[in-house]
Structure formats: structure tokens, C-alpha cells
Image (spheres, rainbow, N blue to C red):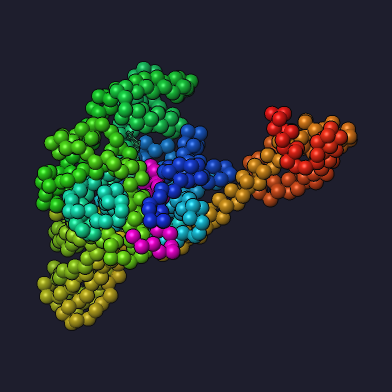
């Protein structure tokens, strides 16, 4: 693939982990974060003094459970009253409130205490914070600003969830964002693994299965020359490792209640600790047949200790695992293929490591070996980076993508029926239109409700937006002709408009978006807030650097005084000791609250006292060395010190 000057970045914004990769020097590289980890927890934590993102936020989960936010991807683009949001809320240690917004309905916001104040953040803002972290990780690695990136979403995300993810990227400062489906990105990674030298994969049908922490996606992808064509997708935006953890949490909280007659469900800290222990046990069960849970002082001084076998874990979750197979069947059916047509079943996502999931899949595919040669935690980000590279530089040999829309889009018509305009699995980008008429006489104004989903009853589908259409010439019912245009762009995002055909007048339809969609004003406000956080982050990093330098310098001075104090006079020793002790005391008292510049001032002050005394100590040392026959040269001194060691 030809390389452009701009870094080609791919970001996998996961429910539990995010990952960023770059295409450079003719290969794809996963970028380690500031902790040296190749994936970053999608966590944000708010404390008395600071906001943490990623590993630092994850480390706050047990000590600061009510202000540590995760699973934002399960809230993004959803309404507060959504049945799934209501269910999840019960088990999250943090609080979720309803916030009125410019559309109908209410949007969910997380309520936290930050710097002693109550603050509320929309899921979009939390996701933007995670994206901003990934952007910074990439910038530190490539050494330049990163404004463009390919960000992935579950294939089964609806229009609102996609739009919300794109808004989150804008808030994070990624102005040029392209969206790609997660299993499609994995297909790019598979393509590269098959033909690392850049040639094209020969014709193959590949079923990508992505079972992560919060979502499940299946995609049937065909490879033919340099065209990667998605034939069908299926999945569930609320099925993944988090759900398996919750089943275990319920199992063990019932056991705890039975044993100790205490209910832990109302204690956020106890719930967070049990959940973390269950997640660990679940991962262990992928390689062992029994796992132990041991938590000291889980609730009111009572310890908890128990075990779970792999068979028990599988029983707790069997219906969820079987749900995955149903989606596989649906995906094959939609692609008009049978099991035997599939050349490779590619596993990605952390939860695809679960042996029972693998066994069910293998049984379904009549014992076929599953393809596990790409890293399940990194494939999505790697694929997104490959796609980013193919977008940033045109080359005939670049892989060409044809993706599909996961859900049908249509209009709610008479008697609440759903009239589909764009059927699911239509290749995108696409543009389709349909003509509608009025159901009552002399209507000059209509509202066209746009829905997304698969049922015939529009009320069971997702309401996306409403096109307000006025100025229709007066006529009896069934006479007016209103043509509705739906366009789905390459990011899978819908744009709609309508025109009246009777007179040929093009009346612009105004789309009133569903409450999940942000207004421009809200996005602008969030962009400003995000910038404030970015500045605060930078100041915090500078403060930590200044603080560490001061601490290190103080420790060095203490050592110097101990080892070489005898080489200067008593008053100088005292002066230096007093300055060191004062600095140590000052550090203890101001460790948390002082600003970065105060640490620098303190450093200058300490250097002012210690610097001249140290110089004197070293001069005396050099003198005594030369008196002992050693030359004053630096190399000689080093040799003597090494001999002493
Ligand atoms: P997402 O993309 O949704 O963030 P990931 O693909 O990172 O999710 O997968 C995270 C999930 O995978 C978590 O629920 C984690 O517990 C689960 N997981 C990771 N390793 C294993 C394992 N060895 N066995 C079972 N589950 C695992
Ligand atoms: Mg994932």
C-alpha cells in the first residue's frame, strides 16, 4: 500500500477496552499507551483533584466506584427510558440520571462528584474523553498532531449510536473521522494476515465473529481480488462479556445472602469488588476448570470465599451463548449461504476466548477448525488503521470496501406500519426514494416519522427523526405525492429529505431529530468543555513531572549529605539539612493541591541552598582524590567508584 504523509490511525472504541493502531513503514503497528499497555480500559474516573482516563481510571474502580464510569458505549445513542439502560443502571456503581434535551424524551447522563462539585456528563462526553486519550496516545507515538482517524463501531449500531460516536469524535478533537464497522475492520486485519506481502486474498468467504465486552457482531465477508464485500451482518448491541460477569455477580450475591443474610446489592463498593473478582474468575475459567473467588471484608467486615466450575459458569450463560449461534444462522441466511460455503470462521473480541462459545461454533460448523491467528484484542484497531491508510492514499492495489447497512430504514405510515425504504444489508453508500401520499383530505402539512428496525410494527423499531413537511397544495386524500429521499453515507449514517411532486415544488423538509441526537449548540458546548479538560490534563501531567523532579532531587540531596556531608562545614551541613527537611514537609502537605509551578519554585529554592554546598563537597572530594594520587579527570573518578561497588 502507498503511504501518505499523514499518519493513518485506526481507533477501536470498545465497551471495555480501546485500542489504537497506525499504518506506517509499510506495516500496521499497535500503539502502546503511557502505561506500556496495548489496550486501554474505556474508563473515566473523577476525583477531588483530577479526571483520569484509561488505566489510571480503571485503578480507581474499587476505591472510587461511584465516580468511575465505564460501559459508556452501552448508553451512547440510547434514551434514558430504554429498557436496557434501566436494567444496566441497577448494576452500575455510578449513578445515571435523566436529562431533558432539545428533542422528545430524556437522555441518560452520569452524575459524579468532581473536585467537590456535582457534575453530569452525557455518554457522548465520556466516550469523547476515551477517544481523546487514544488520540493523545497516538500523537505521542507518531510525534505529530492527529486530527484524522478511522473509528470503529459495532456493525449492529443503529443510526443514532453511529451519529453519537461521530459526535464524540468531534468533541475529542478528531475533525476528520470515518466510521467503519468492527467486524469489517477485522476483515481487513484478516486480509493482511493472509497476504502480508500486499497481494490480494484469493476468493474466500469469511465469517467474522466479534464477541467483546458489551456487544456481539457477526459479518459474512467475501474476498475477491482486492474487493472486500460485506454480504450480511447480524448481532446484538447488548451482548458480551459484561453480561456474563453480571450473571456470575447475581449467582454469588445470592450465595452471599444465603450464607450471611446480608444484601450486597445496595453497596456500590462491594458490588464493584465482586464484579471485578467475577471478571477475573471468568477469564481464568477459559484455561482452568475451576476458579476461586476470595474477597476480604466484602460487606460489613464479612469475608467472602467461594468457587465456580467451568460447567457452572457455562450453565449460567448458556442461553446467551446460544443467542450467538442464532445470529450466526441469521447472518448466513441473509447472505444466502450455507455453512459449507464458509472458508474461515474468524474469532475476535476478548470473549471469543470462552471455550464453550468456541465449542458451540465448532459444533455448528461440523467440527471445522476456527481461525484464531489474528490477535482478538487488536484486530479491530489494526483493520481500522489499514482502512485509514487505504483512504488516505489512492492506489489501485488498495483493498476496496463494500459494506452494508445492518438495519432496515423506513417510514411509519397509516395504522403504525413500517414502510421500508432501504432494506437491511443494502450495500452502502446508497440512496433510495419512495413516494408517499396523504391519508386525509386537504392536508397541507405532514410529519414523516423515520424509523429503523426489522418489525412490521413501527412502534417496535427505533425512532430516528421526523421530517416536518408543510406547503402541500390542498387536495383530496391520496392525491398529493411526496417523495422521500434517504441517503446512507459511507459511515452508515442516514441523511433524509423530501419533495412534493404534484407541483414540482421542492419544499425543504426539516428533520427533527430524536432526543439521542445532539444539537449543534450542545456539541459546541461539549467541545469547549473537552478543551478545558485537555488543558487541565496537560497541567496535571506537568505538575506530576515537576513533583517527581522535586522528589528525586530532594532524595539525591539527602544521599549526598549522608555520603559527603563531612566534606563541608557544620553550618553548611545544617543549612542543607534544614532545607531538605522543609522541602520534605512541604511535599507531604502540598502533594495533592499545589499547582505545578509551585513545585518548580520549590525546586529553585532548594537548588539555591544545596547547589553551592554540593559544588564545595565535590571540589573537596576531587582534591582528596588527587591527593591520593588519582588524577582529576572524570573518567578516572568513575573507575574508582566502580571499583568501590
Ligand atoms: P470490547 O471490544 O467490547 O471492549 P474486548 O474485545 O476488549 O471488548 O473484550 C473484553 C471482554 O472480553 C471482557 O468482558 C473480558 O472479561 C473478556 N475476556 C478477555 N479475556 C477473556 C478470557 N480469557 N476468557 C473469557 N473472557 C475474556
Ligand atoms: Mg471490541
Ligand 1 shows up in which quadrant of the image?
Answer: top left
- Residue 11 in magenta stretch: yes
Quadrant of residue 4 within the rendered picture: bottom left
Is residue 353 visible from the viewing direction of this image? yes
- Residue 384 image offset from top left, x and y in percent: 34, 54
Which residue: 35% across, 50% down? 382
Above or below, 270 relative to 488: above
Which segment is the magenta one? Answer: 1-20
Which residue: 45% across, 56% down? 172
Quadrant the C terminus occupies: top right
Which residue: 71% across, 40% down? 553
Is residue 368 or residue 486 the one in the foreground? Answer: 368
Is residue 457 or residue 428 the one in the foreground? Answer: 428
Which residue: 66% across, 49% down? 596
- In the drawing, does residue 640 fall left or right of residue 133? right
Quadrant of residue 514 within the rendered picture: bottom left
Is residue 71 or residue 620 the one in the foreground? Answer: 620
Above or below, 171 relative to 342: below
Amino acid at each position: 500500500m502507498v503511504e501518505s504523509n499523514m499518519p493513518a490511525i485506526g481507533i477501536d472504541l470498545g465497551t471495555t477496552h480501546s485500542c489504537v493502531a497506525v499504518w506506517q513503514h509499510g506495516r500496521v503497528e499497535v500503539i502502546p499507551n503511557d502505561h506500556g499497555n496495548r489496550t486501554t480500559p474505556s474508563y473515566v474516573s473523577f476525583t477531588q483533584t483530577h479526571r483520569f482516563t484509561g488505566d489510571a481510571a480503571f485503578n480507581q474502580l474499587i476505591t472510587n466506584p461511584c465516580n468511575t464510569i465505564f460501559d459508556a458505549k452501552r448508553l451512547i445513542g440510547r434514551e434514558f427510558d430504554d429498557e436496557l439502560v434501566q436494567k444496566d443502571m441497577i448494576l452500575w456503581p455510578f449513578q445515571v440520571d435523566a436529562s431533558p434535551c432539545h428533542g422528545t424524551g430524556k437522555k441518560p447522563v452520569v452524575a459524579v462528584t468532581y473536585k467537590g462539585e456535582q457534575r453530569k456528563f452525557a455518554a457522548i462526553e465520556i466516550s469523547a474523553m476515551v477517544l481523546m486519550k487514544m488520540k493523545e496516545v497516538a500523537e505521542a507515538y507518531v510525534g505529530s498532531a492527529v486530527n484524522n482517524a478511522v473509528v470503529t463501531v459495532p456493525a449492529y449500531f443503529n443510526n443514532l449510536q453511529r451519529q453519537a460516536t461521530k459526535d464524540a469524535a468531534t468533541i475529542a478533537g478528531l475533525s476528520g473521522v470515518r466510521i467503519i464497522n468492527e467486524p469489517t475492520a477485522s476483515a481487513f486485519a484478516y486480509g493482511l494476515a493472509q497476504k502480508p506481502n500486499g497481494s490480494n486474498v484469493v476468493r474466500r468467504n469469511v465469517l467474522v465473529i466479534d464477541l467483546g465486552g458489551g456487544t456481539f457482531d457477526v459479518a459474512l465477508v467475501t474476498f475477491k481480488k482486492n474487493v472486500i464485500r460485506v454480504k450480511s451482518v447480524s448481532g446484538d448491541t447488548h451482548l458480551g462479556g459484561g453480561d456474563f460477569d453480571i450473571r456470575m455477580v447475581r449467582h454469588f450475591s445470592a450465595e452471599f445472602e444465603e450464607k450471611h443474610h446480608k444484601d450486597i446489592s445496595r453497596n456500590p463498593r462491594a458490588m464493584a469488588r465482586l464484579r471485578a473478582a467475577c471478571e477475573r474468575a471468568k477469564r481464568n475459567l477459559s484455561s482452568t476448570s475451576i476458579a476461586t473467588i476470595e474477597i476480604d471484608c466484602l460487606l460489613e467486615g464479612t469475608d467472602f470465599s467461594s468457587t465456580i466450575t467451568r460447567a457452572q459458569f457455562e450453565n449460567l450463560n448458556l442461553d446467551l451463548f446460544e443467542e450467538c449461534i442464532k445470529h450466526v444462522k441469521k447472518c448466513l441466511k441473509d447472505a444466502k449461504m450455507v455453512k459449507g460455503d464458509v472458508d474461515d470462521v474468524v474469532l475476535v473480541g476478548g470473549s471469543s476466548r470462552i471455550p464453550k462459545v468456541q465449542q458451540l461454533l465448532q459444533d455448528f460448523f461440523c467440527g471445522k477448525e476456527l481461525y484464531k491467528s489474528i490477535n482478538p484484542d487488536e484486530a479491530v484497531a489494526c483493520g481500522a488503521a489499514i482502512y485509514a491508510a487505504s483512504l488516505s492514499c489512492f492506489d489501485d492495489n488498495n483493498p476496496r470496501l463494500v459494506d452494508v447497512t445492518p438495519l432496515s430504514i423506513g417510514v411509519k405510515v397509516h395504522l403504525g406500519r413500517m414502510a421500508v425504504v432501504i432494506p437491511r444489508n443494502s450495500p452502502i453508500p446508497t440512496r433510495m426514494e419512495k413516494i408517499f401520499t396523504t391519508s386525509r383530505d386537504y392536508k397541507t402539512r405532514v410529519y414523516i416519522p423515520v424509523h429503523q428496525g426489522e418489525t412490521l410494527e413501527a412502534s417496535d423499531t427505533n425512532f430516528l427523526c421526523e421530517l416536518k413537511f408543510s406547503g402541500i397544495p390542498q387536495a383530496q386524500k391520496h392525491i398529493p405525492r411526496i417523495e422521500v429521499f434517504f441517503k446512507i453515507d459511507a459511515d452508515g449514517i442516514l441523511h433524509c429529505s423530501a419533495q412534493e411532486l404534484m407541483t414540482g415544488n421542492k419544499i425543504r423538509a426539516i428533520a427533527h431529530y430524536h432526543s439521542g441526537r445532539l444539537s449543534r449548540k450542545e456539541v459546541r458546548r461539549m467541545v469547549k468543555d473537552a478543551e478545558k479538560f485537555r488543558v487541565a490534563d496537560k497541567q496535571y501531567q506537568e505538575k506530576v513531572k515537576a513533583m517527581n523532579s522535586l522528589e528525586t532531587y530532594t532524595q539525591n540531596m539527602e544521599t549526598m549529605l549522608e555520603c559527603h556531608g563531612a566534606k563541608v562545614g557544620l553550618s553548611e551541613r545544617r543549612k542543607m539539612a534544614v532545607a531538605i527537611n522543609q522541602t520534605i514537609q512541604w511535599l507531604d502537605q502540598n502533594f495533592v493541591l499545589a499547582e505545578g509551578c509551585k513545585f518548580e519554585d520549590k525546586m529553585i529554592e532548594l537548588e539555591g541552598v544545596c547547589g553551592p554546598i554540593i559544588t564545595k563537597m565535590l571540589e573537596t572530594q576531587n582534591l582528596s582524590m588527587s591527593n591520593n594520587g588519582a588524577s582529576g579527570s572524570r573518567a578516572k573518578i568513575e573507575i574508582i567508584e566502580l571499583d568501590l561497588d
